Each structure stands twice: as structure tokens, then as C-alpha cells.
Image: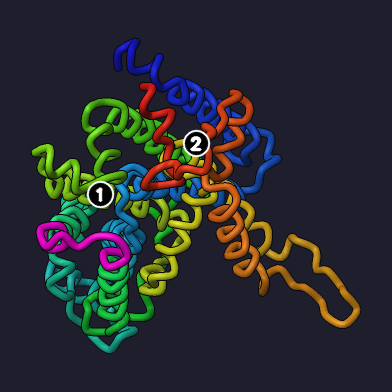
């Protein structure tokens, strides 16, 4: 990264500084390496929040900068979780099976161990054989490659078919949502090879680390999540700050004109769509070992809609806005749905926030869309004295939520 890049993107240094201070503070306050002020369960919540911030960055690049409102990126997030979950469940079950068979007079063969693993994992769905999709579950290296390859290939094929047909706008959003719904319905079936509605469980038990306590594992995953976010932010900031970033913003604002100028619009969109799918998958691979379980409900289309809401509330078209929105909504959701928010007794009705949280989130999205298109990140514009130019009633541009005026000055 050159000096010019950092001078044009001061948010990168500020973001890394805040993230470093936050990571060190949580470590010092944790039960594993600190004064035990922050519980292990809350460390996991914070680690998962960092993963959601990472997938929000991906969503902001594909929507806020490129103008593709994808309602399927949480499907890639969940696929990443399934890929790492397969290895976690296989390797952990292998340890249990080998330990159980060690008391036998005759040492078990490799086939007996494999059959025992299959019975343990798939007995719940009435099967005792490993499906073909588990062919590489024994290898951590191969499964980590699949975390990138499977979502990347799915996004590449889907994007190529959609973009070459020049499907845009709300129609593309519907297609991405349909893809997510189809994938979720397939995973709900027991013959999908991924245990149907039962999903994959026990993912918090890391193979080979049975003697390591959960408080240490939770802080390790927290560090890994912080590292992934810390690497992704400057990388994406670099992507959007150069010529490539100018082109994708132009595609967002006036795709037809960019195509007329001779740029391969479909190629740019396909690259962004595929890259962000892989980033979302990495975030999912870090998230679900901290959550401990994954099932097809995680792929429900509503999850991708929530992702769009986070980015809109934080402020699309700027990376730090996506992080702010995801962190704010995630932590607030944990507070409301965790029963920590006090109920409000109106006499004739009692407001329980567990039931009303989604209504509150939807209302916040509507208000931000109507009255604050810059989202929470607009607070930084206010502090810097940046005001929306007075155009005497003329529209701001093709995308009212973007930063055309500021971008034009860079």
C-alpha cells in the first residue's frame, strides 16, 4: 500500500487502529487471558459479530459499490460453514469411534472405522454410509480449499448466466433469492448428504484440541475473526480506490454508459460477485465453529435480506458503514433477543422485545431509507462538515445512497 493510497483512504488506518484496540481490550477482559470481566459466551458473540462485519463488507462491495442488490450472499456464507463443519464433524467423530474401538481385541480396520463414522453421523437420518459429498471430509486442507471453490464456482456459474443475459435491478435480486431458496430446500432433504434438517452440530469441539477449554478456543476464534476482518478491509479499500473502483461505481450509476465506453461490464460484475461470494464463505467458515451448529435454516432468504438491512443502516457505498451497520445491528439484536432488554408494560399490552425486535429492525430500515440514505456512517460526514450539495431540487444522481459528489473529487 502506497502513501497515496493511505492518504486517499484515511479510514483504513483508523479502522485498523480501532480493531486492534478492540481486540486487545477483549483479550485483556476475557476469561482465558485476562481479568475474566467478559464471559466466554460474550466473547463468542463478539467473534461472530466480527464475522458478520466481514460478510457485510462483501455485501457493500457488491451492492453499495457495484449496484448489485444480491439477496443470496448469506447462502455463500452458510456454504462456507458447511464446508468447514463437515471436517469438524468427521474428524471429531473419528476420534470418538477410534477411542471406542480401541478396547477391541482385534484392532479395527480402516473400513470399520469409516463405517463407524458414517453410522455415528448419519444414523439420525436412517443411513450408515458416507455420501459422495463427504469424499474429502477427512482432509482439513481439501475442505479449506472447498470453502473457496464451492461458493466461488456457484457464484461464477450463476453470475455468468445472469449477467450475460443482462438481468439487472429487482429481477436480479429475485433470481439471487430464488437461488438461495432452492439451495435451502435441497439441504432440508435427508438425501442431500448433509443430514437434512438436523444440520451439522458439535462444531465447537475442535478435533485434536479436546484438552483446550472453551474460553481459550473462543478467544482464538475471536482473534482469527479479527485478523480476517483486518486483512479484508484494506484489501477491499484498495480495490475500490483505484481505476477498478471507479469503473464499478460507474456501473452502479449508469451501466449503459459504461458499456458504451467499451468496458466489459459483465466481466467486472462477475469478478465482484464471485470474489464477494468467496469472502462471504470465509466469514461463514469462521462463524459456525463459534456458533456450534449449522442447519438449512441458515440459508433462508430472510438472512440475506437482513444482510442488506445491516449495510443500508450502516451506510452503503462506504466500507466502514457496512462494518458499523453489521456490528450495531448484531449486538443490538443479541441484547433484545437474549432477554436482557426490559419489557415495557403498557397496561393493556406488554411489549416483549423478543417478539418485537424484527418489527423494530424493519422500521429502522424504512426510516433510514427515507430520511437518512447515508446511514449511520453519515454521522462522520456531519463531523467532517460534509454537506449534501444544494442542487436546487435536482436529483443527486442515479443512486441517492451513493457518494457521487465526494467520489468525483478523488
Residue 100 percent coordinates (x, y):
32, 70
SS assignment at label 2: loop
Q: CA distance from mark 2 to mark 1?
A: 40 Å
Eyeballing the image, is 245 above or below 141?
A: above
Magenta span: predominant SS is helix
Q: Count the numbered circles shown.
A: 2
Q: Residue furthest right?
A: 347
Eyeballing the image, is 40 above or below 19?
A: below
Residue 222 percent coordinates (x, y):
48, 42
The answer to if 163 sits in the magenta stretch is yes
Magenta stretch, residue numbers:
160-173
x 42%, y 48%: residue:
56
Eyeballing the image, is 13 above or below 168?
A: above
Tell me which corner region of the image, top left, top right, bottom left or bottom right, holds residue 366.
bottom right
* Residue on which the image places disc 1: 278
SS assignment at label 1: helix
Left or right for 237, reference 183: right
Amino acid at each position: 500500500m502506497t502513501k497515496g493510497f493511505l492518504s486517499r483512504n484515511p479510514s483504513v488506518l483508523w479502522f485498523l487502529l480501532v480493531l486492534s484496540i478492540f481486540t486487545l481490550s477483549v483479550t485483556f477482559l476475557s476469561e482465558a487471558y485476562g481479568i475474566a470481566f467478559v464471559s466466554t459466551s460474550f466473547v463468542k458473540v463478539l467473534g461472530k459479530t466480527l464475522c458478520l462485519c466481514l460478510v457485510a463488507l462483501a455485501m457493500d462491495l457488491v451492492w453499495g459499490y457495484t449496484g448489485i442488490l444480491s439477496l443470496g450472499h448469506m447462502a455463500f456464507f452458510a456454504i462456507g460453514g458447511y464446508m468447514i463443519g463437515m471436517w469438524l464433524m468427521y474428524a471429531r467423530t473419528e476420534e470418538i469411534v477410534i477411542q471406542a474401538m480401541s478396547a477391541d481385541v482385534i484392532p479395527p480396520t480402516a473400513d470399520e472405522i469409516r463405517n463407524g463414522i458414517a453410522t455415528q453421523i448419519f444414523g439420525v437420518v436412517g443411513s450408515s454410509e458416507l455420501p459422495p459429498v463427504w469424499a474429502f471430509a477427512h482432509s482439513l486442507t481439501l475442505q479449506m480449499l472447498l470453502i473457496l471453490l464451492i461458493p466461488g464456482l456457484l457464484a461464477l456459474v450463476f453470475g455468468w448466466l445472469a449477467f450475460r443475459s443482462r438481468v439487472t435491478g429487482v429481477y436480479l435480486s429475485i433470481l439471487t433469492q430464488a437461488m438461495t431458496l432452492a439451495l435451502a430446500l435441497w439441504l432440508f432433504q435427508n438425501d442431500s448428504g448433509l443430514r437434512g434438517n438436523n444440520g451439522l452440530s458439535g462444531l465447537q469441539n475442535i478435533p485434536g484440541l479436546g484438552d483446550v477449554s472453551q474460553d481459550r478456543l473462543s478467544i482464538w476464534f475471536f482473534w482469527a475473526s479479527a485478523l480476517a476482518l483486518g486483512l479484508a478491509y484494506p484489501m477491499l479499500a484498495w480495490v475500490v480506490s483505484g481505476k477498478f473502483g471507479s469503473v464499478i461505481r460507474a456501473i452502479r450509476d449508469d451501466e449503459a454508459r459504461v458499456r458504451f465506453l467499451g468496458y466489459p461490464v459483465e466481466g467486472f460484475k462477475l469478478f465482484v460477485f464471485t470474489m464477494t461470494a468467496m469472502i462471504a464463505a470465509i466469514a461463514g467458515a469462521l462463524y459456525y465453529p463459534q456458533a456450534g451448529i449449522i442447519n438449512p435454516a441458515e440459508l433462508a432468504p430472510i438472512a440475506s435480506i437482513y444482510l442488506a438491512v445491516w449495510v443500508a443502516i450502516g451506510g452503503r457505498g462506504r466500507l466502514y458503514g457496512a462494518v458499523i451497520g453489521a456490528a450495531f445491528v448484531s449486538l443490538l439484536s443479541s441484547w433484545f433477543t437474549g432477554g436482557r432488554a426490559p419489557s415495557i408494560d403498557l397496561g393493556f399490552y406488554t411489549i416483549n422485545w423478543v417478539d418485537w425486535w424484527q418489527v423494530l429492525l424493519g422500521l429502522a430500515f424504512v426510516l433510514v431509507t427515507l430520511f437518512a440514505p447515508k446511514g449511520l456512517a453519515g454521522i462522520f460526514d456531519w463531523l467532517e462538515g460534509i454537506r449534501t450539495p444544494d442542487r436546487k431540487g435536482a436529483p443527486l444522481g442515479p443512486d441517492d445512497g451513493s457518494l457521487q459528489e465526494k467520489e468525483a473529487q478523488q
